[in-house]
């Protein structure tokens, strides 16, 4: 049932773009890897921000009274909160791009 829906959507899109279904499917798979790279870059940036916040917080946390200490703690918590979903999405798109391509097709882009 799902494969029939995916095939129907791919045929319509291939006809609209003037290409074959096989070529369109390969492009969609590569696009999922590109999304995975974007998520991985985001995860690396969040990890970098988290490390910087930890270093700043440890250096100045004698009394932990300044606004910089509080701000670095909040930014660090935010970066840690973003790091986990970004990493999961990156790994998923590298490991199983077919699932995410089908999900994209069924969601209607």
Image: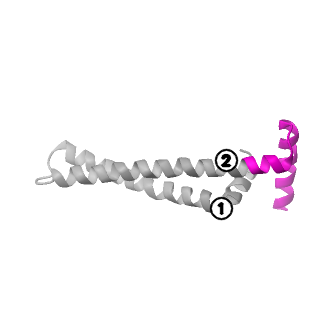
- Residue 100: percent from left, percent from top: 67, 56
Question: Which residue occupies 68% across, 49% down?
Answer: 30
- Give the side of residue 62 with respect to residue 9, left or right: left
Q: Give the residue number, with chain letter if any, for mark 1.
A: 96
7 magenta-colored: yes
Quadrant position of the C terminus in the picture: top right
- Give the side of residue 32 with respect to residue 91, left or right: right
Residue lying at the far left in this picture: please name it.
63
**Which secondary structure dominates the residues rendered in magenta?**
helix
Of residues 45 and 106, which is closer to you in this image?
Answer: 45
Of residues 25 and 67, which is closer to you in this image?
Answer: 25
Q: Which mark is residue 57?
A: none
Q: CA distance from mark 1 to mark 2?
A: 12 Å
Colouring rule applied to residues:
one colour
- Residue 58: percent from left, percent from top: 19, 55
Quadrant position of the N terminus in the picture: bottom right
Q: Which mark is residue 31?
A: 2
Classed neighbour count for the residue bearing mark 2: other residues with Cα under 10 Å, few (<14), some (14–19), many (≥20): some
Q: Secondary structure at mark 1?
A: loop
Label pair 1/2, CB-CB below 8 angstroms = no
Q: Earlier in the sequence, mark 1 or mark 2?
A: 2
Q: Which residues are magenta?
A: 1-27
- Residue 65: percent from left, percent from top: 14, 48
Of residues 5 and 51, which is closer to you in this image?
Answer: 51
Question: Which residue occupies 32% across, 47% down?
Answer: 75
Q: Quadrant of residue 98?
A: bottom right
Question: Which residue occupies 85% across, 41% down?
Answer: 19
Above or below, 106 relative to 13: below
- Residue 77: percent from left, percent from top: 34, 54
């Amino acid at each position: 049932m799902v494969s029939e829906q995916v095939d129907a959507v791919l045929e319509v899109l291939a006809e609209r773009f003037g290409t074959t279904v096989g070529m369109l499917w390969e492009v969609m798979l590569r696009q999922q890897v590109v999304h995975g790279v974007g998520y991985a870059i985001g995860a690396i940036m969040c990890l970098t921000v988290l490390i910087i916040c930890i270093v700043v917080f440890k250096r100045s946390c004698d009394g932990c009274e300044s606004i910089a200490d509080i701000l670095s703690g909040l930014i660090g918590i935010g970066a840690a909160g973003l790091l986990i979903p970004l990493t999961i999405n990156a790994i998923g798109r590298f490991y199983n791009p077919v699932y995410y391509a089908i999900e994209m097709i069924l969601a209607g882009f």
